[in-house]
Amino acid sequence: RAARFLCESDPAIVLAGDMLLDTDLAALVERHRARGARCSLLLRRDARAESFGSIGLDARDRLRRIARRFDLGGETQAGVFVGLRLVSPSLFASLPDRDSFEDLSDWLAPLAAAGADDIVGSLLEPADCVWEPVGTPCEYLAANLHTPRVSYFDSTTRVAPGTQVLGDPADLILGAGAQLGAGVRLQRSVV
């Protein structure tokens, strides 16, 4: 339903909202365009691949495998998909004709299986792509209490302006404008 809006960008950057991510987006867009790709998936070499699954690419960075549910063979490298896609407007013409679908399995995999060689991945090293999932309460708490170094937070505080970090070691994060009432005691929380 957002395809018309997304077609206004070339490419559209589609990012899942359940992660903390820091990487050079301009470089990814430049690489996407230079390849003539219709879709570029951001992958990261990551020891957590067993937990999150991985996507396999061939020697030309073309999509060959999605976790255990799609495999064309010919994989030479793999990484964890971090939820960032660069999508060129021309790809939206091939959207599945239904209201609900999963983009990897129901849209990109069939295109790759039909021979599309412009569905590619960019595989980055951990030093070039900070990625922390925050899709569960435990992941969200861990990312707040132990925030990785990212370019968009001050290197010493690593928090957004107005945020308070309390406890030693830090175990309570109060966002800007958050207040605790009299007598409230919290630990290992994000407010």
Image: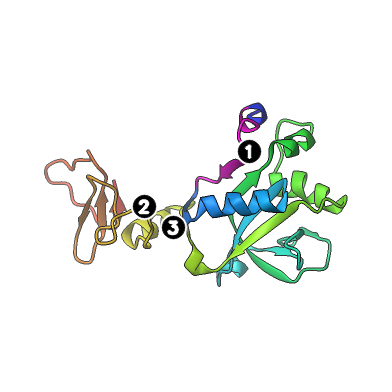
Q: Determine which residue is flagged by label 3.
A: 139
Q: Earlier in the sequence, mark 3 or mark 1?
A: 1
Magenta stretch? 5-17
Quadrant location, the N terminus: top right
Location of residue 49 in the rendering, given as x and y in whole percent from the top left corner? 60, 68
Q: Determine which residue is flagged by label 1.
A: 10
The reply to whether residue 83 is visible in this rendering is: no
| Location of residue 178 with respect to 68 vertically, above or below | above
Location of residue 126 in the rendering, given as x and y in whole percent from the top left corner? 51, 68
Q: Is residue 105 left or right of residue 122?
A: right
Which one is nearer the viewer's eye here, 165 or 44?
Answer: 44
Q: Which numbered disc, 3 or 1, marks the residue closer to the eye?
A: 1
Which one is nearer the viewer's eye here, 143 or 108?
Answer: 108
Which one is nearer the viewer's eye here, 138 or 31?
Answer: 31
- Look at label 1 and name its amino acid: Asp
Location of residue 185 in the rendering, given as x and y in whole percent from the top left corner? 18, 51
In the structure shown, which secondary structural element does the residue marked by tag 3 occupy?
Answer: helix
Quadrant of the image occupied by residue 179: top left
The 10 Å Cα crowd at callout 1, few under 14, some 14 to 19, many 20 or more, is: some
- Look at label 2 and name its amino acid: Tyr
The 10 Å Cα crowd at callout 3, few under 14, some 14 to 19, many 20 or more, is: some
- Look at label 3 and name its amino acid: Glu
The 10 Å Cα crowd at callout 2, few under 14, some 14 to 19, many 20 or more, is: few
Query: In 3D space, how far apart are the residues under numbered discs 3 and 2 (Cα atoms)?
Result: 20 Å
Query: In 3D space, how far apart are the residues under numbered discs 1 and 2 (Cα atoms)?
Result: 24 Å
Q: Determine which residue is flagged by label 2.
A: 152
